[in-house]
């Protein structure tokens, strides 16, 4: 509940970069606690927010986390497609190429 309120507050305040990053971080935290499904939900949300608000780092970090989940589930084709998207999106920016590739 607190995370949802924080995300809403970030959106209201225009802290749009942080919306995607927080979703990504919550996804990571849930996976660390063994709650893989909830972690994947937050990462899908991080991808969505990243695309919506053009917060590329949050989007790509969420995609990376989703590749871990796809691999854990044995969904290797989905993992490969996510890696392809990461590579494609990171290639357009020097910082993201350095950070993600």
Image (tube, rainbow, N blue to C red):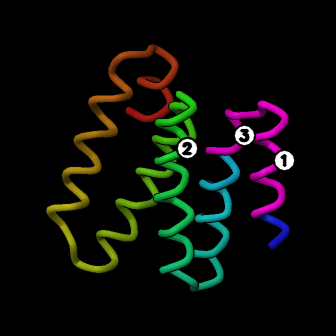
The span from disc 3 to disc 1 (Cα, nearest Å) is 10 Å
Q: Which residue is mark 2?
A: 49
Examine the structure image and report whether residue 5 is included in the region drawn in magenta: yes
Q: Are marks 2 and 3 in contact (CB under 8 Å)?
A: no
Give, as a single range, the part of the protein colored magenta. 4-20
Is 15 on the left or on the right of 35, as rendered? right
Is 83 on the left or on the right of 90, as rendered? left
- Quick one: SS at disc 2? helix
The numbered mark at residue 26 is: none
Q: Are marks 1 and 2 in contact (CB under 8 Å)?
A: no
Q: Which residue is mark 3?
A: 18
Q: Residue furthest front?
A: 12
The span from disc 1 to disc 2 (Cα, nearest Å) is 14 Å
Q: Label 1 neighbourhood size at 10 Å, few (<14), some (14-19), many (20+)?
A: few
Q: Residue at x 22, y 78 (%)?
A: 74
The span from disc 2 to disc 3 (Cα, nearest Å) is 10 Å
């Amino acid at each position: 509940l607190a995370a949802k309120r924080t995300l809403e507050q970030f959106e209201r305040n225009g802290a749009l970069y942080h919306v995607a990053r927080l979703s990504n971080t919550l996804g990571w935290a849930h996976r660390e606690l063994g709650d893989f499904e909830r972690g994947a939900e937050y990462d899908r949300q991080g991808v969505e927010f990243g695309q919506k608000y053009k917060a590329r780092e949050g989007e790509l970090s969420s995609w990376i986390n989703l590749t871990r989940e796809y691999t854990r589930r044995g969904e290797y084709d989905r993992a490969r497609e996510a890696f392809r998207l990461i590579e494609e999106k990171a290639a357009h920016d020097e910082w993201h190429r350095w950070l993600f590739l």
